[in-house]
């Protein structure tokens, strides 16, 4: 029987190809397994690294410092506002002027503590202020001016008279004796100067206490007086001059306004000095 060499050669050739393919497959499978193994090792190392990092983080958190002082910050907002200072406004206040017609003066010339009796003192006429013969008189009376002069306005007692300056009706508690500005004024009796002042209505005033229940007040004097408070004078001593400073009687001609009281009651000065 004749062998088919072609068929054997073809078979042998096919067998070699099969083993070659099988070997290549084995190599590829081995390479794939080796690659998979390396990737697994790498993933294991990455996982271990991550766990180590987490442990370090946890340890860091566990070892936190807790004794740091706490800073307290106010829970409110501080707002700084610029202050504006307004410039002061200067205003001129004009002094109020009181019309002369509104001025009513009927006050005693002594201090406010002095009380004027409701009834006239014993021996004094309540109408004209004259003193009866049985009442004590001032010692060594002296006229207040160098010589007797005209009486412009007499003592009114309880009667109301019109003030020519203010236009008001009031009692006239003294006597107005005509005198030129600068005329000498004298003490009507012995006594002590108990008050010297510049009254806003009656001008420069002087009170002479005779120490026997009688007191004399001089109004409208000049500023240059010859005496001061506390001086002791005798009848006829020079006190000062007529000054025309009594604004409340400025409508009258120049004069001396003189008042007199006996035991707290107004009396007519002429009843004591016109002797």
Image (spheres, rainbow, N blue to C red):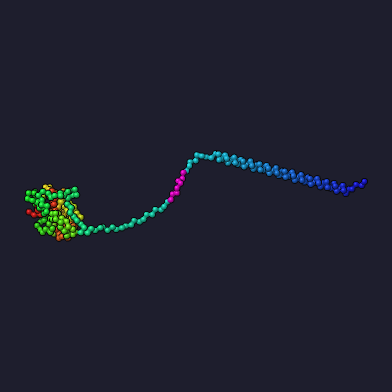
Q: Residue at left 88%, top 49%?
A: 6
Q: Residue at left 49%, top 40%?
A: 68
Of residues 242 and 255, which is closer to you in this image? 255
Q: In the rendered view, would you say 39 is above or below 197?
A: above
Q: Give the percent coordinates (x, y) of residue 61.
A: 55, 40
Q: Is residue 73 magenta?
A: yes
Q: Give the percent coordinates (x, y) of residue 231.
A: 14, 49
Of residues 78 and 233, which is closer to you in this image? 78
Count of labels in the image: 0
| Main SS category, magenta section | loop
Q: Give the percent coordinates (x, y) of residue 37.
A: 70, 42
Chain part drawn in magenta: 72-79
Q: Is residue 17 left or right of residue 148?
A: right
Q: Is residue 147 magenta?
A: no
Of residues 168 and 240, which is closer to you in this image? 168
Q: Residue at left 42%, top 51%?
A: 80
Q: Is residue 31 left or right of residue 66?
A: right
Is residue 181 visible to the viewer in this orientation of the structure? no
Q: In the rendered view, would you say 98 is above or below 75?
A: below
Q: Give the percent coordinates (x, y) of residue 247.
A: 19, 58
Q: Outermost residue toward the right?
A: 1
Is residue 80 visible to the viewer in this orientation of the structure? yes
State the image quarter where residue 256 is shown: bottom left
* Picture quarter with the C terminus: bottom left
């Amino acid at each position: 029987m004749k062998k088919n060499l072609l068929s054997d050669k073809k078979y042998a050739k096919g067998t070699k190809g099969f083993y070659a393919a099988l070997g290549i497959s084995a190599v590829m499978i081995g390479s794939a397994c080796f690659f998979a193994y390396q990737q697994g090792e790498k993933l294991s190392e990455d996982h271990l690294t991550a766990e180590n990092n987490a442990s370090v983080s946890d340890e860091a958190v566990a070892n936190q410092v807790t004794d740091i002082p706490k800073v307290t910050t106010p829970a409110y907002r501080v707002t700084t506002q610029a202050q504006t200072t307004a410039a002061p406004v200067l205003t001129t206040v004009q002094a109020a002027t009181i019309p002369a017609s509104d001025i009513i003066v009927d006050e005693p010339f002594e201090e406010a503590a002095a009380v004027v009796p409701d009834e006239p003192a014993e021996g004094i006429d309540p109408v004209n202020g004259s003193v009866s013969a049985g009442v004590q008189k001032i010692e060594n009376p002296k006229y207040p001016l160098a010589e007797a002069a005209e009486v412009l306005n007499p003592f009114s007692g309880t009667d109301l008279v019109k003030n020519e300056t203010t236009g008001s009706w009031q009692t006239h508690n003294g006597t107005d004796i005509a005198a030129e500005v600068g005329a000498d004024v004298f003490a009507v009796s012995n006594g002590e100067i108990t008050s010297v002042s510049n009254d806003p209505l009656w001008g420069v005033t002087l009170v002479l206490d005779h120490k026997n229940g009688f007191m004399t007040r001089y109004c409208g004097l000049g500023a240059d007086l010859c005496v001061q408070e506390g001086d002791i004078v005798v009848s006829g001593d020079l006190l000062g001059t007529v000054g025309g400073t009594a604004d409340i009687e400025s409508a009258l001609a120049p004069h001396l306004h003189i008042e007199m009281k006996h035991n707290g009651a107004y009396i007519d000065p002429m009843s004591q000095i016109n002797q």
